[in-house]
Amino acid sequence: MKVLVWIALAVLVYLALRKKITSAQQSSQQAPPPAQTSAGETMLACATCQVFIPASEAVMRGDNAYCCAEHANQSA
């Protein structure tokens, strides 16, 4: 009789651990909600090296956009 009680207890512990592990795996697999982003920003190509940079970070010289002051000075 004692053996059946221990077997039943072991089965209950096993089922509880299995449920906890599967719920932890499911919660870790769910992707976090996407961060709210703005509509985006205009990307400009550097007139010297053609690397695309956000318009807010571009160094403007006349109608040309540059990725850095060094490239802006090179073409001046």
Image: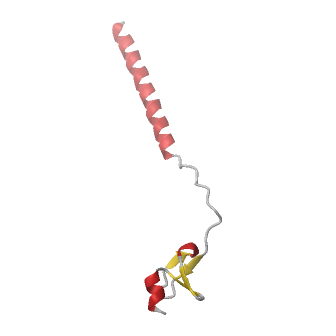
Q: Toward the viewer: 62 or 20?
A: 62
Q: Position of residue 8 (x, y in %)?
A: 41, 16
Q: Position of residue 2 (x, y in %)?
A: 35, 8
**On the picture, is 1 further left or further right than 60?**
left
**Residue 58, placed above or below residue 4:** below
Q: Toward the viewer: 42 or 70?
A: 70
The residue located at (46%, 31%) in the rendering is 20
Q: Toward the viewer: 54 or 17?
A: 54
The residue located at (56%, 83%) in the rendering is 60
Residue 40: image quadrant is bottom right
**On the picture, is 13 further left or further right than 29?**
left
The residue located at (46%, 82%) in the rendering is 69
**On the picture, is 25 further left or further right than 60?**
left
- Colour logic: secondary structure
Residue 44: image quadrant is bottom right
**Residue 19, placed above or below residue 7:** below
Looking at the image, the residue that sits furthest to the bottom is 76
Q: Toward the viewer: 74 or 19?
A: 74
Q: Position of residue 10 (x, y in %)?
A: 38, 20
Q: Position of residue 9 (x, y in %)?
A: 40, 16
Q: Which image quarter is the N terminus in?
A: top left
